[in-house]
Image: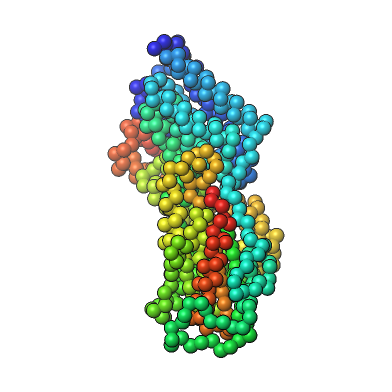
Amino acid sequence: MESFPLSHRDVRLCLLGIGAGLLALHLTLSWRLDDDQLISNSLLLWIGTCYLIWHKRSQIHPQFDKSNLLGLLPIGFVLLRSSFLPNGSFLAVLPLLAALGLALLTSGFRGLVAFWRELVILACLALPVALFLFVTFDISIYTAKVASFVLWYAGKPLRLEGAILYLGQGAVNVAGGCSGQEQIFHLFGIAVMACLIFPFRRCWVMLGVAIAIAFVINALRVCLMTLLVAAGNQTGFVYWHDGSGSLLFSMISVGIFGWIYSEFSNAGFSDATLNDPGLSQAELASHDAFHEGQR
Amino acid sequence: MNLLESNASHPAEVEAQDDTRPIPSETAGANNRANNQPLIYWVLLWLTCLSVVGVLAKSLIAPASVQRQPLPPAQLLAEVPLRHWQAIDHSGLDGRYEYRSVGPTRSPVNSLPTDTPLAPQTPTRHLTVTVYEMNAFTANSRRFQRDAAIARSFDPSWPQVRRLAGVGSYVLARDRTTTTLTACITPQGKSVGSYEDYLGQTYRQQFEPLRLLAWAAGTGVVRDARCLWITMSMPQAETPPDQAELLLEEAWREWFPRWKGVLPPG
């Protein structure tokens, strides 16, 4: 095979161009879809992925073998679909396919192993689509139950029928966007990203914590919307249901999760260095030096 | 190792090892060192890069419409004539159809068991049908299933889900005031009355290679979870439940073929 002199930097620049282009393409299409949840989630997960790649940038040395050619398949598919028939479910899968193609293009199958963290983070965006294909679950009824419990505890005379909350002259049907599934996936993705970027011992427990936080915060949003409907405030209902208000609740749940995560990671890191054999010697050394400095 | 010079791929490990690295100029020199790669790799990378830039430019200058869900909506029928029933409300656009019986009160076509008490003669019977397109079997429709199961627990002989050959399943339920027949018509033209039947219908789709190809081509969805939820009800004040069930089934046999194509496959 004819060879061509190329520096690693040239190849890396080319790969960077492809990656940046695919990222820009995804964000452009997501913006056109006008799905705030998808845009915010995508931005966050892309930032996490770029952060990981930035940290290993000097260690990436692309090498060609035949398996690199396989990377053209997902990238070609992404480009074709983006050109002609992009839709919501495709945009959720696009980052994973793009990353898969780019990893293969960089170093073939070895690229998949080297970039597994980045692939897992971007897979979180495709998780709702994949779960919808293979699992059917509807948490609306449980969201409605928790919301009705909170309202009942607050002394509101409400009636619950299935997933419908009746309060005064108003009623709220908890379904689809109200159920909290989107918020759960959103926070779950953030939790996975946090565990991969800032790991600590048993940080995977935080995945469950993320699901619980998203569920409870959304149930509180449903309570608020029920109160607004009972008061006849339709504008307020629309704001908290579809408008910026719904994103505000997402921000609150992310903030709470971030705070809990940082608290646990601060507490958990010292245990991890002493007990976790999985940590590298370099990490142990830097940790010891840190404590030396503190003394 | 070609891809990564060390096994450290995590930021924490990388940062820790950065301290022990050679001076930056040496690293930079290694990075810029010419490395013989096959020409095809170079061509491959440049072509991919140009394609990505091209598609990105197209999406900025002449974007394709980004669809949320490429599924054709159901077109509700404006009028649905039924034998022995006269339509009294044509508000089919909101999915509600009202009928009253034609002529004198008649017995159902199917013969009733001899011990079935006949309804007192009433001038007319009324039938109300509601049609609603659902994105999935929601919690509320499942609640209906649960209510039907509770009703059955009071009367074990009363069947909850019934099936018609070539049509599918449906549910008959009764409460204090009405007798109801409900079923969901899937885009595949099957009637499903239970959640299990619904799952059977929708999960079977995703293993069809053609459906996966259609999704890949952007012309379809892998799993079309929609269904057309239909509820037929008769007030018990006019028709006793046993007779109403037979009349509802008779109406359903006529109703189903007219509606099974209304929800086009995705």
In this rendering, the answer to whether A29 lies above or below B255 is: above
Tell me the residue at 35%/28% (across/down): B7
Q: Is residue A47 left or right of residue B97?
A: left
Image coloring type: rainbow
Tell me the residue at 63%/36% (across/down): B64
Tell me the residue at 42%/27% (across/down): A70
Q: Nearer the viewer, residue A192 or A4?
A: A4
Q: Nearer the viewer, residue A84 or B184?
A: B184
Q: Position of residue A237 (x, y in %)?
A: 66, 60
Asked where in the image residue B135 lies, by quadrant, the reply is: bottom right
Q: If the image is split into quadrants, where does the N terminus of chain B sit?
A: top left
In this rendering, the answer to whether A14 lies above or below A85 is: above
Number of labelled discs? 0
Residue A103 visible in the displayed image = yes
Q: Nearer the viewer, residue B83 or A131?
A: B83
Residue A198 visible in the displayed image = no
